[in-house]
Image (cartoon, helix red, strand yellow):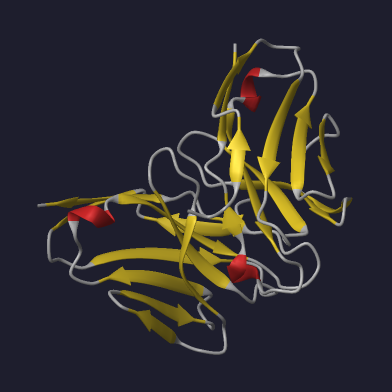
Amino acid sequence: ETGVTQSPTHLIKTRGQQVTLRCSSQSGHNTVSWYQQALGQGPQFIFQYYREEENGRGNFPPRFSGLQFPNYSSELNVNALELDDSALYLCASRHSGRIADTQYFGPGTRLTVL
Amino acid sequence: QQQVKQSPQSLIVQKGGISIINCAYENTAFDYFPWYQQFPGKGPALLIAIRPDVSEKKEGRFTISFNKSAKQFSLHIMDSQPGDSATYFCAALTQGGSEKLVFGKGTKLTVNP
């Protein structure tokens, strides 16, 4: 096990709604990244948080936002859901002082937008 | 723009055979090249990784070959086993900064018994 948990496992929403996905990282992991994995595709980087500040963002619109908390948990919020937002959402965490190969992925949240 | 191209999309190998998955990248700033293994219902798990200052890295049955001039790298799975059946992703990143991983589209490997 990676020590990274995500909730919920599955989620169904309708177009236009808002959703919050949660991630709990290993203790000491002060860097968390979120990825979107569409069916049959590789994960795509959404953004990264370090010490509760966003410090990198992929090609995703502002309706994708995040929060990171001091207790090593984080959230991904998506507003005004669109059908194309249906995907597996992955969080990955690591300690900032460690090299990239110590990054661990959670099992993901499967979001379906109807 | 797909910065990391992966092939084949799917691969079927007999038990004991060699599985080979290829990737090519465009961004010469990439300096770390990991391979991830993903089983259904799980997140990607790091399998093996290489940096561009070496041409080959081996860990058990898994080997990465890296060709910096061609901007290509590949994963070889020796003595493939049914338990290796999974989706494999190559990725690349530039260390420092946000260190975002750029993934290929994945290869679904099936190892028949």
| Quarter holding residue B95 | bottom right
Q: Is residue A5 left or right of residue A25?
A: left
What residue is rendered at 76% in x and 50% in y?
Answer: A72
Percent position of residue A1, x then y? 47, 53
The quarter of the picture where residue B92 lies is bottom right
User: Relative to A17, does residue B21 appear above or below in the rendering?
Assistant: below
Percent across and percent down for residue A100 are: 64, 69
Exactly how many numbered labels are in the figure? 0
Residue at position x 59%, y 20% from top?
A11
- Residue A64 percent location from the top left of the image: 79, 33
Q: Residue at x 35, y 54 (%)?
A: B8
Please state which of residues B71 and A8 is positioned toward the viewer in this rendering: A8
Observer-nearest residue: B65 or B41? B41
At 73% from the left edge and 62% from the top edge, which residue is drawn? Answer: A28
- Considering every residue shown, the one lying at the far right of the view is A53
Position of A97 compared to B14: left or right? right
Q: Quadrant of the C terminus of chain A?
A: top right
- Please tell me whether residue A15 is drawn above or below residue A47 in the rendered image: above
Instruction: State left or right for residue A58 relative to residue B24.
Output: right
**Percent position (x, y) of residue B77?**
28, 68
Relative to residue A35, is residue B82 drawn left or right? left
Q: Is residue A57 visible?
A: yes
**Res. A59 in view:** no
Q: Identify whether A28 is placed above or below A63.
A: below
